[in-house]
Image (cartoon, rainbow, N blue to C red):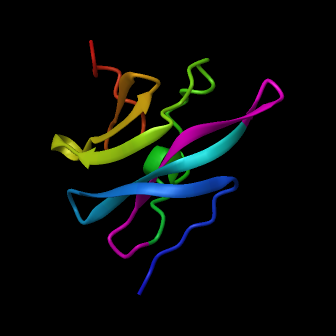
């Protein structure tokens, strides 16, 4: 049995992590049109224990942390995802020679307390 979800402009999945409660989070690459330039960004999708997209995750089943919209080049490689305490999801990647990490709460929204 497999689970699939259709998201426009997703070009691949890099990693998946099991989240407490039997849920899962998958991280991949998507394309965005930003200021009339096609750019890549990271997308995270939340899945229910039965493999369906979790519609409550980030209010749509998926979230893009927004590196591209914030003017940063999104992580180009080595994207990884890990589950943390309280259902948090950590997404990491490389931006040039730097490491980028974002923390999402269990509901898929960015954690405003991360790195504060």
Q: Quadrant of the C terminus?
A: top left
Q: Nearer the viewer, residue 5 or 96?
A: 96
For the question of whether residue 107 can be seen, the reply is no
Up-down: is 100 above or below 19?
above
Left or right of 57 in this view: 31: right
Which residue is depicted at the point 55% across and 57% down? 12
Which residue is depicted at the point 34% across and 46% down? 80
For the question of whether residue 61 can be seen, the reply is yes
Left or right of 39 in this view: 91: left
Q: Main secondary structure of the magenta part?
A: strand
Q: Residue 68's x, y, as percent?
A: 60, 27
Q: Quadrant of the N terminus?
A: bottom left
* Residue 11 position by quadrant: bottom right
- Is residue 37 magenta-colored? yes
Q: Residue furthest front?
A: 97
Q: Which residues are magenta?
A: 33-51
Which residue is depicted at the point 63% across and 24% down? 69
Q: Residue 24's x, y, as percent?
A: 33, 60
Q: Residue 84's x, y, as percent?
A: 19, 43
Up-down: is 75 above or below 62?
above
Up-down: is 61 above or below 31?
below
Which residue is depicted at the point 52% across and 41% down? 42
- Is residue 35 magenta-colored? yes
Q: Residue furthest top?
A: 116
């Amino acid at each position: 049995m497999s689970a699939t979800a259709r998201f426009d402009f997703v070009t691949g999945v890099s990693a998946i992590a099991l989240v407490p409660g039997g849920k899962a989070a998958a991280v991949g690459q998507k394309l965005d049109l930003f200021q009339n330039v096609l750019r890549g960004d990271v997308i995270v999708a939340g899945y229910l224990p039965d493999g369906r997209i979790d519609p409550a995750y980030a209010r749509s089943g998926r979230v893009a942390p927004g590196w591209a919209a914030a003017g940063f080049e999104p992580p180009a490689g080595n994207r990884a995802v890990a589950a943390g305490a309280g259902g948090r999801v950590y997404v990491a990647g490389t931006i040039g020679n730097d490491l980028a990490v974002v923390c999402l709460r269990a509901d898929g929204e960015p954690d405003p307390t991360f790195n504060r």
